[in-house]
């Protein structure tokens, strides 16, 4: 059976973040495995040696908040 639901954003929790000036940051890529993120970060270091990239584990699950909100709205109706 092929799943028809959209993939959850936490299915790729390992993120490569580019650190920008003024405490800003940008997500460069997301990965399912830490090893893949490490390999990609090494390539980024070769291509962009002056940029600062870090690997983080993003454990947020926004779908849970959406489900809770939807349930509360349904209960109030």
Image: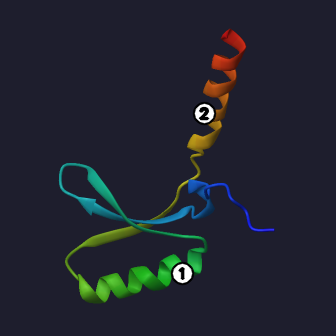
Compute the Cα span from label 1 to label 2.
29 Å
Can you identify the residue that label 1 sits on? 36
User: Residue visible at 68% across and 59% down?
Assistant: 4
Residue projecting furthest to the right? 1
Image height check: is 1 above or below 44? above
Residue 30 in the image, given as x and y percentages of width and height: 48, 67
User: Residue visible at 36% across and 87% down?
Assistant: 43
Q: In which image quadrant can residue 8 be found?
A: bottom right
Single out the mark in the foreground, 1 or 2.
Answer: 2
Can you identify the residue that label 2 sits on? 65
Which of 41 and 75 lies nearest the eye of the viewer? 75
* Residue density around tag 1, few if under 14, some if 14–19, many if 20 or more, within 10 Å: few
* Colouring scheme applied when the structure was drawn: rainbow
* Residue density around tag 2, few if under 14, some if 14–19, many if 20 or more, within 10 Å: few
User: Residue visible at 69% across and 19% down?
Assistant: 74
The first of marks 1 and 2 along the sequence is: 1
- Total number of numbered discs in the rendering: 2
Image height check: is 19 above or below 50? above
Residue 65 in the image, given as x and y percentages of width and height: 60, 33
Which of 5 and 41 lies nearest the eye of the viewer? 5
Residue 27 in the image, given as x and y percentages of width and height: 37, 61
Which of 61 and 70 lies nearest the eye of the viewer? 70
Quadrant of the rendering where the N terminus is positioned: bottom right
Q: Secondary structure at mark 2?
A: helix
Labels 1 & 2 near each other (Cβ < 8 A): no
Identify the mark at residue 18; answer none if there is no mark: none
Q: Secondary structure at mark 1?
A: helix
Q: In which image quadrant can residue 46 be found?
A: bottom left
């Amino acid at each position: 059976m092929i799943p028809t639901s959209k993939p959850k954003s936490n299915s790729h929790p390992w993120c490569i973040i580019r650190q920008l000036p003024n405490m800003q940051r940008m997500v460069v890529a997301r990965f399912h495995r830490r090893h893949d993120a490490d390999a990609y970060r090494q390539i980024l270091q070769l291509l962009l040696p002056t940029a600062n990239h870090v690997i983080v584990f993003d454990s947020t699950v926004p779908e849970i908040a959406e489900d809770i909100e939807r349930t509360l709205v349904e209960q109030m109706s």
